[in-house]
Amino acid sequence: MNSIADRRRRFRAVLSGDTCIHPGSVFDPMSARIAEDLGFECGMFAGSTASLTVLGAPDLIVLTLTEFAEQARRICRAVRILPLLVDADHGYGNALNAMRTVEELEAAGVAAMTLEDTVLPRPYGDGKVALISLDEGLGKVRAALAARDDPGFCVVARTGAVSVNGLADAMERTRAYTASGADALFYTGVRTRAELDALSAVATLPIILGGVEGTEVNDRDYLAARGVRVALQGHQPIMAAARAVHDTLKALREGTKPGDLPGLPAPGLMAAATRDDEYKRWTRDFLGGGA
């Protein structure tokens, strides 16, 4: 098993590289192991998938930091070399809460966390998406950087300014977050090449993009040339898993015999995801018998 420090170095190597990767969207130990076995350069654990996994609830920031960090810890404990990038939302509060978030996620073994400048959770009122002020956003990023113990742990400043306040504000925040000492910049809401071209012209840090599917920027060579090192594809694995559970339970409820169920994994997949060979070896070595 590679150390946590090794995994953080792997993620920094992605940021310092010259290509754009798609992370594997993971939500629990087995999904993370599968992503690792398939060769993904990093895993992505989002706030939305955490809320679905832990609470079975939509992404409304009703999940707590403790719940999020504990699930991240389970994921990090289960993998060998896969670095984990997590969406830490708004840091679960103000700048001091963001410091606590860094402490918990760093201790959990996470390689990198994003910290966004959206007003969260949803306030009472009209419910429109809004951003905190640039000063407050900078305060959170600086607090997060001050709180980390391992300099290998990445703090990524995230903003949705392009779609919320417009490109000019996004560029201003880009300059400010870059100067703050953040390790990378994360943008949501970028839909056009003109927007990304403008941002990359002022960004001197590696870029992470969310929501590129269905947009004109969704070309990995183009993204790499604009400094994008990680481009999220969405979180289809947990949705596919939910459908598989639903369809399997429905079939059983309606009388399908277990042996006739479609879509079940081959035994080898489950054995690999659960590291069955290792447990058999440990049983032989430490329990004095066969497995």
Image (tube, helix red, strand yellow):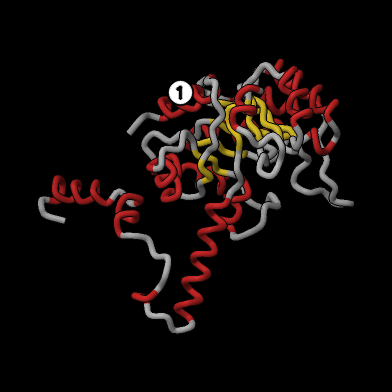
Q: Residue drawn 74% across and 18% down? A: 201
Q: Name the residue carrying label 1.
A: 9
Location of the C terminus (image quadrant):
bottom left
Label 1 neighbour load within 10 Å: few <14, some 14-19, many 20+ = some
Q: Amino acid at mark 1?
A: Arg
Q: Is residue 16 visible?
A: yes
At which x and y percent is residue 159? 73, 33
Q: Is residue 133 above or below residue 214?
A: above
Identity of the residue furthest to the bottom in this view? 255
- Choose top left, top right, bottom left or bottom right for residue 154: top right
Question: Which structural element holds mark 1?
Answer: helix
Q: Is residue 152 above or below residue 164?
A: above
Give whichever of 134, 16 is nearer the camera.
Answer: 16
Location of the N terminus (image quadrant):
top left
At which x and y percent is residue 234? 61, 46
Identity of the residue furthest to the right in this view? 126
Q: Residue drawn 54% across and 40% down? A: 44
Q: Is residue 117 visible?
A: no
At which x and y percent is residue 15? 55, 23
Figure label count: 1
- Choose top left, top right, bottom left or bottom right for residue 181: top right
Q: Residue drawn 66% across and 38% down? A: 210
Q: Is residue 172 left or right of residue 200?
A: right
Q: Is residue 138 above or below residue 204?
A: below
- Choose top left, top right, bottom left or bottom right for residue 165: top right
